[in-house]
Image (cartoon, helix red, strand yellow):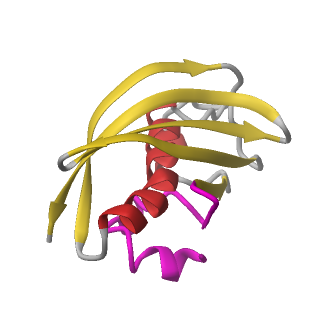
Amino acid sequence: MNREEIKRILPHREPMLLVDEATVEDGVAAGRYTVRGDEWFLQGHFPGNPVVPGVILCEMMAQSACALLLEKAGEGMTPYFTSLDKVRFKHMVLPGDTIEFTCTITAQKGPFYFGQGKGYVAGKLCISGEFSFAVKGA
């Protein structure tokens, strides 16, 4: 899926749409984002040394997972973050980097979906974590 196709399943819009491409295959969601360097979240983080903030990496990972989540939950649903756990940042993500995420849904209970994900730049692990969402009707 390209950005326009992603907009059909995610409620996010610029500047909060933080995934350029997404695919779902064999129960794994893959998302990709290329950091241009002019993003709003780099403007003060850090002057002269721009680094993608960890909370933004978490959001990118979650948006990547949502392609799979909404496939499981159905159209017309909105995912809401309910938890982050065991998040680890291993390497910085910088302007010019393309970060690639892989995410899986590990469990579901009622409207709650639980998952895990990892993000890599050039094969190097940058972020990993567990998360959950509540999925509500539109």
Range drawn in magenta: 1-27
State the residue at coordinates (48%, 73%).
Answer: 6
Q: Is there any visible trace of residue 82 in the rendered image?
A: yes
Numbered marks: total: 0
The quadrant of the image that shows the C terminus is bottom left
Q: Is residue 128 left or right of residue 69?
A: right
Residue 24 spot, x, y in % from top left: 59, 64
The one nearer the camera, 107 or 61, is: 107
Q: Is there any visible trace of residue 14 in the rendered image?
A: no
Magenta stretch prevailing secondary structure: loop
Instruction: Specify whether residue 46 is painted magenta.
Output: no
Residue 112 spot, x, y in % from top left: 24, 44
Residue 60 spot, x, y in % from top left: 51, 47
Name above or below for residue 83 compared with residue 5. above
Name above or below for residue 100 compared with residue 11. above
State the residue at coordinates (60%, 21%).
Answer: 89
Instruction: Specify whether residue 7 is painted magenta.
Output: yes
Q: Is residue 86 left or right of residue 134?
A: right
Q: Is residue 20 left or right of residue 84?
A: right
State the residue at coordinates (76%, 46%).
Answer: 97
The quadrant of the image that shows the N terminus is bottom right
State the residue at coordinates (33%, 37%).
Answer: 132
